[in-house]
Structures are given as structure tokens and as C-alpha cells.
Amino acid sequence: MAMNSKSDALLPITLTDPPSRAQEKLFNGSAMTKGGAYAAISYMICAVFLVMFNKAALSSYNFPCANVITLCQMISSSCFLYALRRLNLISFSTNEPVAALTDTSKTSVPIKTLVNTSPLSLTYLLYMLASMESVRGVNVPMYTTLRRTTVVFTMMLEYILVRQRYTRPILGSVALILVGAFVAGAGDLSFDSYGYTVVLLSNIATAVYLTTIARIGKSSGLNSFGLMWCNGVLCAPILLMWIIFQNDVQMTMNFPYLLSPGFLGVLVMSCILAFFLNYTVFLNTTLNSALTQTICGNMKDFFTVALGWVIFGGLAFDLVNVFGQLLGFIGSVMYAYFKLIGK
């Protein structure tokens, strides 16, 4: 009876639990499973709100240290994972039996596994730092528009690494996304060369990170929680040393709103959302693909743009810009449709 209660307490969110539900097709003829669809939708919801809270901390409160927020997110995620593992609610391995979860001493992963996943962790650190800095320099509508070009870098890397080929409908939808990004950029009256450059670097880092997940994540023997744990354990010390070197600690202590309830609330929500976002990124990439994860990022942009325009502003209304963003959104919808019907 005790074993049954333990089993019922497990979160049904590892990559292989339960395989019948995760691998069940969304509908007849669909190329996407139900588990993949749930992962994609969950990612989009988390991503929209995380951008809002990060933008609020960096722009509305003018917090000067984006790396400190990133470190807080990493430490919070590691603490969440440790607590869930100690409570026997999750495992870190895809093939870890339920009975093994009763051994609370297994709250980590082997050193050899950490070494094998270190390339993923390093790309994760670059991805996090570039993404956080890119939010600061560009208004929310243009940030989401420029981020759509990530799909091109992802397709290039997938072709180079695994010789992945795509059908004409998929290529056509991606081309429309790219055209929309260029059109919207041409209509941005608040052009900032530094901000655009950082977003471009963020796109490259994102593409490398997603393709690394697809390669290492499926061969490491770890599920999404295990990969997140490795990222936190390996990246947090490196980022802490960088923060100390950059004198961000002193800047943070001198920040006038450091103990403000509003700022602390934004920071806490950012950490919570970052945990769920990282999990859904792993889940979506492993259940679907790196390209699908990138397109999901484009799909959620419609809601991010709308909320960012209303809450933060920063972009004058321009028909060219609106038309470009509309083209990008239509391209994302087309990709999702072709993916669902299996073309």
C-alpha cells in the first residue's frame, strides 16, 4: 500500500512516463504526439510571462545586473529540483525505477554524466546570458520579431550536425517568418545597433543550445529534470565568479529598489517562471525537435508583442512594422499546421 501511494505521488512528467500517453498521436495522420503538443503549449505560456517579468526588472526598475537575475534563476531552479527529488516526486534519469526514488541519497547525478553533459551546460550559460541582455536593449515588440530569425540558424545547425532535411511547405513557412522579421525591422523607428547585435548573438546561442539538447539530451540517459540539474550545478559557480569579477555584487547591493516589495515580487516570479520555462524547453525539444521548439517561440510572440506593446510601449505605431510582424505570425501558424498534418 505504501508503494502504491509513492507511485501515485510521482509527477507524470519524465520523458518516459507514461510512454503510451506521451507517444499517442494528437489525431490520425498528425506528426505531433499529445505529449509534444502539451509541451509546446506549456512552453509558450511560460515564455510570454517570463519575458514580461524580465523586462519589468531590467527596464521598469532599471536593475543594472542582468547576470544576477540569471544566477538567481539558476540557484532557484537547483533548489526546486533538489527539494522535489528529496520528496521522491521526480527522478533525474529516464530509466530510473520507481523503487529507486525511495533512496533519498540519490539527489545528484554521476560525475561522468556531468562531464558528458558539460557542452550542453556551457551552451546553456551562453544562451541565458545573451537572452537576458537582449531583453534590455530592444523594445518587446522588436525583440520578439528579431528572435524569429533563430529558426534559420537552427535549421542550418540541424542540417550540419544530423543532415536534417525539410519539406517544401516547412521551408516556405520559415521563409515567410524570415521575410516578416526583415520587414518589421525596416519599420522600427527606434533602431538600436547594439540591441540588434545582442539579439542576433542571442539567436545564434539559442540555436546552438537547442541542437545540443537534441543531441546530448537523448543520449545522456537523463530526463528533463536531470539535464536542468546538470546545467545548474555546472553553470552557477562559473556565473558567480563572473559576477564577482564584474563587480555586480556591489552594484546589486547599491540598487535603490533591492528591498522593494514590487521588485522582489518581480524577481521571485521571474525565478519561478524560469524553472518551468527551462523544463518545457527540454521537454518540447526532446519530444518534438529543435526546430519545433524554435517555431513555438515564434508562435508565442503574437501574445508577447501584444502585452509588451500595452505594458511597456517603446515602439511607435507603424504600418510597415505591423505588416512585418503579421507576416511572421502567419508563417509560424503555417509551420504549426504543416507539422500537425505531417507534411
Image (cartoon, grey):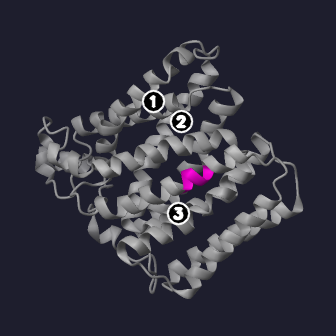
Asked whether, in this view, residue 277 is left or right of residue 182, the answer is: left
The residue positioned 43% from the left and 54% from the top of the image is 280
Q: Which stretch did the figure color magenta?
A: 199-203
Residue where numbered disc 3 is placed: 294
Label 3 to label 2: alpha-carbon separation:
21 Å
Mark 3 is on which residue type? Thr
Mark 2 is on which residue type? Ser
Q: Secondary structure at mark 3?
A: helix
Residue where numbered disc 1 is placed: 72
Mark 1 is on which residue type? Cys
Q: Residues within 10 Å of mark 2 (few under 14, many from 20)?
A: many
Q: Are marks 2 and 1 in contact (CB under 8 Å)?
A: yes
- The residue nearer to you, when weighing 114 against 227, is 114
In the rendering, at what x and y percent does residue 219 appear? 24, 62
Residue 33 in view (yes/no): no
Residue where numbered disc 2 is placed: 270
Label 2 to label 1: alpha-carbon separation:
9 Å
> Residue 129, relative to residue 176: is it above or below?
above
The residue positioned 87% from the left and 49% from the top of the image is 316
Asked whether, in this view, residue 58 is left or right of residue 38, the answer is: right
Q: Secondary structure at mark 2?
A: helix
Label 1 to label 3: alpha-carbon separation:
25 Å
